[in-house]
Amino acid sequence: MSSDNVEFIQNNIYANFETGNIPAILALFDPDIKFTHHGPREKIPFAGEWQGVAGAGEMLQTFVETVEPVFVNMQSIVASENKVVVLINESYRVKATGKAYITDVVHIWTIDNGMVVQFDELYDSAAIADAFEGSAQ
């Protein structure tokens, strides 16, 4: 089952994110999904806890509106039972400031009955918050 979950995440979530197909991603979320980007929302507009598909959609929309990718390198993906953990090294540029950040990221996906029921993203929130402050230097 865990290898099926890895394929599910790779082929449906990440593949659709790369092409910008947010509606296809949201269709895979449980209506009551808990979607969490750890960090202070007052400094990082997409941080915080987002509830339900509407909240997850708002978060994803905020993310794509405020940052643009520099690079995203998936380093590892592992699964156990209904959890998929993805390790990523990424860099995004904040559109409003022009400043880029680089951070290691951990995505933790929880899947139940073919739907994502929970998502947690952990990253260097200080580096991201700094990129959102001020103008590029």
Image (cartoon, helix red, strand yellow):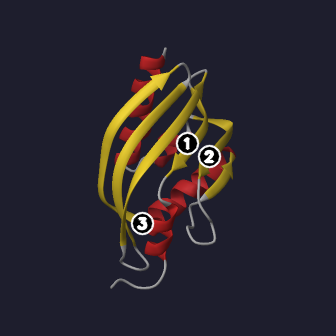
- x, y percentage for residue 40? 62, 65
Residue matched to label 1: 26
> Viewer-proximal residue, 95 or 130?
130
Residue matched to label 2: 35
Residue at (43%, 49%) from the top-left corner?
105
- x, y percentage for residue 100? 35, 70
- Horizontally, is 130 left or right of 91 in the view? right
State which mark lies toward you, 3 or 1: 3
For badge 1, the amino acid type reads Leu
Q: Label 1: how many residues lie within 10 Å, few (<14), some (14-19) or many (20+)? A: some
Q: Earlier in the sequence, mark 3 or mark 2?
A: 2
Residue at (48%, 42%) from the top-left corner?
107
**Residue 93 disc label:** none
Q: In the rendered image, which quarter is residue 46 located in?
A: bottom right
**Residue 67 disc label:** 3
- x, y percentage for residue 71? 28, 56
